[in-house]
Image (cartoon, rainbow, N blue to C red):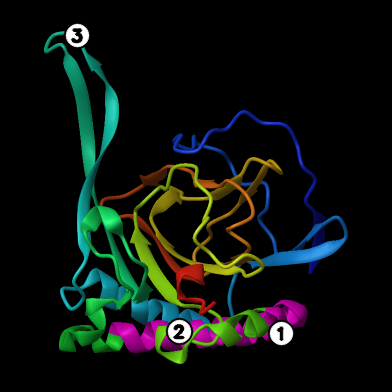
Amino acid sequence: MKKIDLIKVGNNVKMGQQCPDIEPNITEDCMFYEDGVLVGFYIKKMPKKMIDLADLANKELRSKNVPKTKMLRKHNDGWDDEKQQWRYKNQVAQYSAILGSIPPKAHLRRNYLTRSSIHQIPSAKTFVQAMLLLAKESEELIKEIFPEQFEKQMKLFEKVPKEWRFGRLFTSSISNYNISAPFHRDAGNIVGAVNVIITKKMNATGGNLHVPDYNATMDSANNSILVYPAWKNIHGVTPIHATKEGGYRNSLVFYPLKAFVVK
């Protein structure tokens, strides 16, 4: 795999800003190093077993079998002088589904740890199983390519009770369908751990992860996998553009939350 040194550059990106359209400059299999230390990796095409599981999870998520939090995104097509209003086109379905453990959320009046209710939905069983198996295969890939991180994360998870785990290295999972996240940092993640981002994509462009600290933009190619410490830097997702009706980008993400670490 190609070695890429992540070198910090100046930027004026602020949390909450929308990420603009940026072409990816990381488009091939590579390992990321910062100050000579391996911190993550990117593979443009996963092993076949992982592709098959991601295909199944993606299919189930897009079906009626899985309950989802839904939104609607519109593309701004410019200002209409006659009507004195913005024109919109191509309304695109946006939704997400969370699995595994969910931290307390005071603004929702939920001040306790809980598990995703999707686990209790009979029709979502195949989706849950596919995502669990995909998490486990991701862990095996990390163990093979980045064994130091695998051992480190296993050690970090010694303080995470088994009932709050999603696999061995994660507490939670989220599937984001056509969602371009604004610039943020995963401050709720366990420091020292990594996230996994798997992409399913069809008839769409964009949806690339941009890390302004390094001016690095990872290609969200179909069937790609990115392993990266999302707690470390501000990052955002470039806009997603359907090139045909029904086009989409879906990210299947596994992550470790520090809310479930027993102190």
Identify residue for label 1.
151
Q: CA distance from mark 1 to mark 2?
A: 16 Å
Q: Are marks 3 and 2 in contact (CB under 8 Å)?
A: no
Q: Say whether disc 3 or disc 1 marks the residue closer to the N-terminus.
A: 3
As rendered, which of 18 and 207 lies closer to the eye? 18
Residue 234 image position (x, y, % from top left):
58, 46
87 vs 107, nearest the viewer: 107
Q: Is residue 100 visible?
A: yes
Query: What count of labels does the image hold?
Result: 3
Secondary element at tag 2: loop
Q: Amino acid at mark 1?
A: Glu
In the displayed structure, would residue 93 be above or below residue 175? above
Q: Quadrant of residue 77?
A: top left
Q: Which amino acid type is marked by label 3?
A: Asp
Front disc: 3 or 1 = 1
Disc 3 and disc 2: Cα gap in Å? 54 Å
Prevailing secondary structure class for the magenta stretch in the rendered image:
helix
In the image, the segment drawn in magenta is 127-152
Say left or right for 225 vs 172: right
Residue 112 rendering spot, x and y as whole percentages: 30, 71
Name the residue: 47% across, 87% down: 161
Classed neighbour count for the residue bearing mark 1: other residues with Cα under 10 Å, few (<14), some (14–19), many (≥20): some
Q: Which residue is mark 3?
A: 81
Residue drawn 26% across the image and 51% down it: 245
The tag on residue 165 is 2
The crowding category of the residue bearing disc 2, from other C-alpha atoms within 10 Å (few below 14, some 14 to 19, many at least 20), is: some
Residues under labels 3 and 1: Cα distance? 60 Å
